[in-house]
Image (spheres, helix red, strand yellow):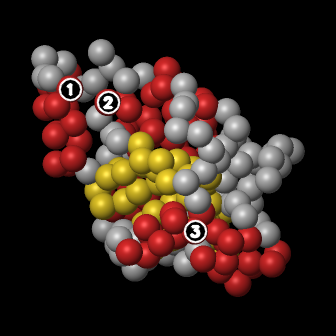
Amino acid sequence: MNVLDHLKNKSVDDIKSYCKDTCIDAGVAMIHVNGDFNLSTLVRNANFFGFKEAMYVGGSKQWDRRGTVGTHHYTDLNHIKTEQDFVTYVNDNGYTLIAVENNIPKYSDKTVSIFNHWVFTGVDKPMFVFGEEKSGLSDYILDNADYIVTIPAYGSVRSLNVGTTSGIVMGFYRNYIDNN
């Protein structure tokens, strides 16, 4: 069982309650991404960084849970069928929609590097959304995002995989919350 030492003898329900009691008011979502392990990594990262909820938008409800290493028992993954339903959910629940995407010139006015010290200032309840590795996020999601966070590249590779990116973004946000 891959849980903190003080949770090793607890039931699944007890661990789930612990996660709900200690989570931060933040969510993450993945738009129909090919490759179950990215989705599993997102759920595992959401649990590790203490995020309130994880969502999967589009695609099939079926996914390979092995990559979560059991964290799907403690952090719920909610399936939403369409991007429109997702944006409605975000708005109805008071989230700030933050798209995570490579720099896209069309949206440069609302794109900010994750390394800017003020990137999360004034964001009390974010919903970070990640897209498909090949095609990224749709214009619909980017148009509806309050702003777009990007991770600058310093080597030769154009981008990171979605699972890795989600961990970086969640870690940066959690650090911001814990230190402000």
Q: Which residue is mark 1?
A: 12
The outermost residue toward the bottom is 109
**Mark 2 closeness class: few <14, some 14–19, many ≥20 residues within 10 Å:** some
Disc nearest the viewer among 3 and 1:
3
Q: Which residue is mark 2?
A: 73
- Judging from the image, what secondary structure is the residue with disc 2 in? helix
Residue at 33% in and 20% down:
2
Disc nearest the viewer among 3 and 2:
3
Quadrant position of residue 12:
top left
Distance of label 3 from label 2 (alpha carbons) = 27 Å
Residue at 60% in and 77% down:
144
- Could you tell me the amino acid type at mark 1? Val
Tell whether 180 sits left or right of 81.
Answer: left
Distance of label 1 from label 2 (alpha carbons) = 7 Å
Q: Is residue 65 visible?
A: yes
Q: Position of residue 160 (x, y in %)?
A: 71, 44
Q: Which residue is mark 3?
A: 84
- Could you tell me the amino acid type at mark 2? His
